[in-house]
Structures are given as C-alpha cells and as structure tokens.
Image: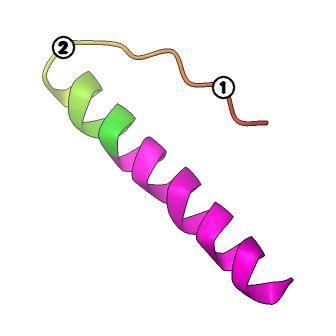
Amino acid sequence: MANQKKENMDSILKKLISQSEAEANGDTIELSLD
C-alpha cells in the first residue's frame, strides 16, 4: 500500500511540475487530482 501511495504522489508531483512549466510558458493546463 505504501508503494502505491508513493507512486501516486510521484504522479501528482509530475503533474504539478508540468503545470508550473506550462504556466511559466504562458500556457495553462487543467489538471484533475482525484
């Protein structure tokens, strides 16, 4: 269970990083964090 949770957190972090980079480029990405 701990492994799955870590993978989920890594996935969320990657989404947030992608969003931050996109916003820095003037683009916006809609992300849904379930």
Q: Quadrant of residue 25?
A: top left
Residue 14's place in the image compared with 6, above or below, is above
Residue 1's place in the image compared with 18, above or below, is below
Hey, what amino acid is under mark 1? Answer: Ser
Near-viewer residue (16 or 11): 11
Q: Residue furthest left?
A: 25
Q: Which residue is mark 2?
A: 26
Rendered-image quadrant of the C terminus: top right
Secondary element at tag 1: loop
Distance CA(mark 2)–CA(mark 1): 19 Å
What residue appears at the point 53 percent right and 66 percent down from the top-left corner? 10
Q: Quadrant of residue 19?
A: top left
Q: Position of residue 5 (x, y in %)?
A: 76, 73
The stretch in magenta equals: 1-17
Chief SS of the magenta region: helix
Hey, what amino acid is under mark 2? Answer: Gly
Q: Which residue is mark 1?
A: 32
What residue appears at the point 23 percent right and 37 percent down from the top-left corner? 21
Which label was assigned to residue 19? Answer: none
Question: CB atoms at circles 2 and 1 under 8 Å apart?
Answer: no
